[in-house]
């Protein structure tokens, strides 16, 4: 099996009853923490302008919660905004060994697509956990190497993790999930150039990764390989 096939199989087959209880409880805590940080960030002046942009990008459909806004957005727009807000204050969680800001990606992707798909909380948590696991594995496969080459793992690996979350929540076949991972890989990026001047685009990296994962699953469902 290829790496993509193994990741897709893991994500698509994951069931909450197979996850250790301690992991489930930790996932709930981290998920709620990410939502709290995102809600706090949504009160800042810049968040209104970011939200306006995400609303324009999101197009039709209003099924998913957008932090700090009365109106809802489609899942792709909500994931873009929420992931960016969660990361913007630099209080979001990090898996130190893999250097992944996991919940900014995983929670925003899982929440948005779960709301739009109207699935259970168990399915939402499974997608969230699967995304975290995938991102950690990708980061640990080459610790520090993404950064050394000018990329943020939360953005590059995050696109893959978000695609796995969305594939699990949407019930994709393993074959379509593999395609979604490939499509996400074709879009994954996240330059570290912001380090030179503190550009706020850094906050976009998890939001863009979540957006990419959801878009990749939609394209895979449409037959793109």
Image: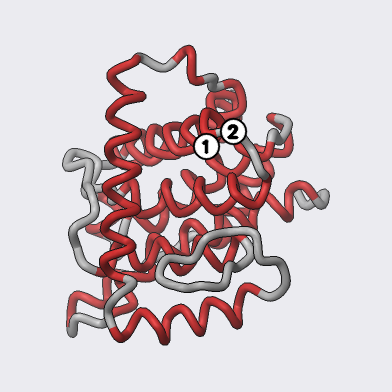
2 and 1 marks in contact (CB < 8 Å)? yes
Whether 116 is drawn above or below 139: the answer is: below
**At numbered mark 2, what does the secondary structure look like: helix, strand or loop?**
loop
Question: Horizontal and vertical percent for residue 8?
Answer: 59, 31
**Which residue corresponds to the image point at 24% horizontal and 41% vertical from the top-left?**
98
Question: Horizontal and vertical percent for residue 28?
Answer: 34, 34
**At numbered mark 1, what does the secondary structure look like: helix, strand or loop?**
helix
Whether 106 is drawn above or below 173: the answer is: below
Which residue reaches farthest front? Answer: 70
Label 2 crowd bin: few (<14), some (14–19), many (20+), radius 10 Å = few
As measured in the structure, the alpha-carbon distance from the residue carrying label 2 to the one carrying label 1 is 6 Å
Whether 24 is drawn above or below 72: the answer is: above
Whether 8 is drawn above or below 102: the answer is: above
What color scheme is it?
A: secondary structure
User: Which circle marks residue 182 in the picture?
Assistant: none
The residue identified by callout 2 is 120
In the figure, is residue 7 to the left or right of 129?
right
Question: Horizontal and vertical percent for residue 30?
Answer: 29, 40
The mark tally for this picture is 2
Question: Horizontal and vertical percent for residue 124?
Answer: 52, 37
Which residue reaches farthest right? Answer: 223
**Which residue corresponds to the image point at 21% horizontal and 67% vertical from the top-left?**
89
**Which residue corresponds to the image point at 50% horizontal and 30% vertical from the top-left?**
126
User: Which circle marks residue 124 in the picture?
Assistant: 1
**Which residue corresponds to the image point at 51% horizontal and 46% vertical from the top-left?**
110
Of residue 35 and residue 145, the one placed in the foreground of this image is 35
Label 1 crowd bin: few (<14), some (14–19), many (20+), radius 10 Å = many
């Amino acid at each position: 099996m290829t790496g993509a096939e193994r990741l897709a199989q893991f994500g698509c087959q994951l069931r909450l009853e197979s996850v250790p209880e301690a992991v489930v409880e930790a996932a709930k805590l981290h998920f709620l923490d990410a939502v709290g940080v995102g809600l706090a960030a949504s009160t800042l002046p810049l968040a209104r302008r970011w939200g306006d942009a995400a609303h324009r990008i999101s197009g039709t459909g209003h099924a998913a919660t957008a932090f700090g806004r009365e109106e809802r957005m489609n899942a792709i727009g909500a994931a873009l905004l929420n992931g960016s807000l969660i990361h913007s204050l630099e209080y979001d969680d990090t898996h130190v060994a893999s250097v992944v800001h996991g919940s900014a990606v995983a929670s925003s992707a899982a929440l948005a697509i779960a709301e739009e798909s109207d699935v259970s909380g168990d399915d939402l948590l499974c997608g969230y956990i699967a995304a975290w696991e995938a991102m950690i594995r990708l980061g640990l496969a080459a610790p520090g190497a993404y950064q050394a080459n000018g990329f943020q793992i939360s953005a590059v690996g995050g696109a893959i993790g978000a695609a796995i979350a969305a594939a699990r929540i949407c019930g994709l076949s393993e074959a379509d999930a593999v395609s979604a991972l490939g499509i996400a890989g074709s879009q994954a990026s996240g330059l570290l150039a912001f380090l030179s001047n503190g550009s706020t685009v850094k906050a976009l990296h998890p939001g863009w990764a979540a957006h990419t994962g959801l878009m990749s699953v939609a394209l895979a469902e449409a037959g793109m390989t």
